[in-house]
Image (spheres, grey):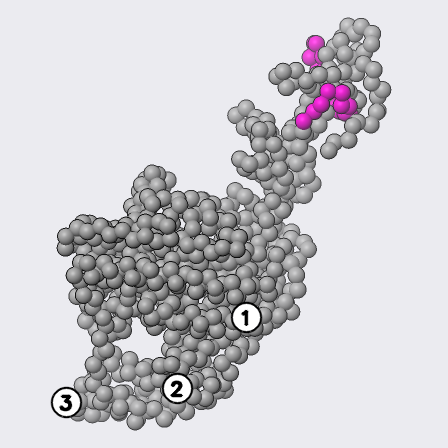
Amino acid sequence: MPAKIQTVSFDGREIRLTTGLYAPQAGGSVLIECGDTAVLVTATRAKGREGIDFLPLTCDYEERLYAAGRIPGSFFRREGRPPERAILTTRLIDRPLRPLFPSWLRDDLQVVATCLSLDERVPPDVLAVTGASIATLLAKIPFSGPMAAVRVGLLGDDFVLNPSYREIERSELDLIVAGTPSGVVMVEAGANQLPEQDVIEAIDFGYEAVGELIKAQQTLLSELGIEQVFPEPQVQDPALPAFLEQECGAGIGEVLKQFSLTKAERDAQLDGIKAGVAQKIAGLSDDDPIRVAAAGKALGNTYKGITKKLMRAQILSEGKRVDGRNLDEVRPISAAVGVLPKRVHGSGLFQRGLTQVLSTATLGTPSDAQEMDDLNPMGEKTYLHHYNFPPYSVGETRPMRSPGRREVGHGALAERAIIPVLPPKESFPYVLRVVSECLSSNGSTSMGSVCGSTLALMDAGVPLKAPVSGAAMGLIKEGDEVRILTDIQGIEDFLGDMDFKVAGTEKGITALQMDMKISGLAVSTIAEAVNQARPARLHILEKMLEAIAKPRDVLSPHAPRLLSFRIDPELIGTVIGPGGRTIKGITERTNTKIDIEDGGIVTIASHDGAAAEEAQRIIEGLTRRISEGEMFNGSVTRIIPIGAFVEILPGKEGMIHISQLSEARVEKVEDVIKVGDAVTVRVREIDNRGRINLTLRGVAQEQVPVPVD
């Protein structure tokens, strides 16, 4: 393919697409650039493996710190395991791409996006998503695209397309919309308690912009003379599906209508029907067409397809789900707090149906903040949410390894949902970590984690601006018929067409995440799902508040005590002292931990509140500006031949020259005062080196000092 550079004008900026130049052995490649951000995206197809029954798609987003002119901070000075934000970008690429490939495709597919250069005005993630579509089209892989993604921010009353990192930080909304000609295929958002209607308008605004990038891809294919390969329906022998429907369709339908069954009982009965028909097929002759068609995984897949068809038909025609709920009904809910001893600073147990999540909250000091060694300029995290999904939560056994992409993604979603309601750093300077342990899973443990984390934080005494709850919405679409399901359980997620998670407060939405199994959905349908989620969220929130109505007034006795205040940034050096001696002396004297930020915010941590207050008095004394003529009660700390030093404020001393000890002549300092004496002094002068000179002359002792502001 000859090298070609295409320029796309998009929202007043230029997006440059370079094809046919880089990675010539990849199936398809594009260098997508905007400003000084450049992302190389490749798509490669290889012959599939025998016997697999799934689409073997691998997406990878690779960060290179040279893109920002940095050298990695690790011991080996090279990139290692992908950082969390890179994993989240990988998921961002995978989620809108995966449903656009045909379900029958079994070839190995790999999409790799590598950020080669970073401009802080242009985040690379949405470029990587759009680039993945272009590379796939160039590789001539069957694909229901083109697909593109944009980011939408909200600054004031205006929506902003593809805002910079700094604009994202100030924005009330951080929304990513991916779409195809058929509709929206993925939504990811964090919001500052925005009303549902504002979020819907933002999705509509983003999808309209996506259309421009889709047209640009179609133009590129036309100019390169490449014809898009659309997925063809898989031709399947109807004999096996017809046989299974005849033999077990009625039995499956009866099981799906037994609403009183538990998940385990339903699964056992469906497995029993499947085993019975499998035994019947095994009794057929070796050359029987049905037995031949049922070889390998074909029987299981076909049986699953019939179950899916019958479950969906029951919802569409009768409006009833497998557990008997109405379409907008939430499963039974229970919530509890303080379920663990107070050595755990806060704990909450949330259960919805068979989904159960135990969340714990830990309060740490500012030095516990996580330093992020990645390309994102926002380099520190003070709220961390970690999600664990052990195999026993779904009744399985498997080796337990480090968190996978799913665990990272679910933790990040719950984290995003809670951040808008955290108290400001100035009034509550703790670093917070929440860990959500999924103890049982049957649909939307991520939203269970949001609810559990709210309970745990309130139990820990964190003064949240408002409690947050979440619900997962599902969808069944057959032709023009659409049914939206509230609070989906596992089978509805597995056999449905959409998983739409909505989290927020009574005031509005804080997080969204929508994934599709079809090639697109109209914004009007998404709006219906968003609005239907609100009463579900509020119902769940009501049940949570029955367990704990507001954050506790007192922290766990095992949580650190923090004091936070601000000093003049120019006086930070005074507190630190030469070689750090002053601050080290304060920490040793008070047995506290002290952090000072460049902006002058001082945070003192201690398990002893009185010790923290003493350290604060010392620092405030060191940084208080003294004026000539002010009077202080102080204590003599040391004597030298020419005078005495008096501590007038914690950590701050002034000197009384021997000539200022008395109106009369003084031969020896000790004739007037001794170490440890309490004296009242007046500030005589502050010299050009900042030294405080004191006097006793004309000062009545035991005089009340000038109040300290």
Residue range highlighted in magenta: 625-644
Q: Rounded to the nearest whole Å, what is the CA distance between mark 1 and mark 3?
A: 56 Å
- The numbered mark at residue 313 is 2
User: Is the C-beta separation of discs 1 and 3 under 8 Å?
Assistant: no
On the image, the x and y values in percent for residue 416 come to 49, 57
| Quarter placement of the N terminus | bottom left
Residue 163 showing in the rendered view:
yes
The amino acid beneath tag 2 is Ala
N-term-proximal mark, 1 vs 3? 3
Position of residue 550 in the picture relative to residue 271 (left or right)? right
Q: Rounded to the nearest whole Å, what is the CA distance between mark 3 and mark 2?
A: 34 Å
N-term-proximal mark, 2 vs 1? 2
On the image, the x and y values in percent for residue 475 come to 42, 76
Position above or below: 700 against 403:
above
Displayed quadrant of residue 534: bottom right
The amino acid beneath tag 1 is Arg
Of helix, strand and loop, which one carries label 3?
loop
Position above or below: 601 against 250:
above
Q: Nearer the viewer, residue 82 or 591?
A: 82
- The numbered mark at residue 534 is 1
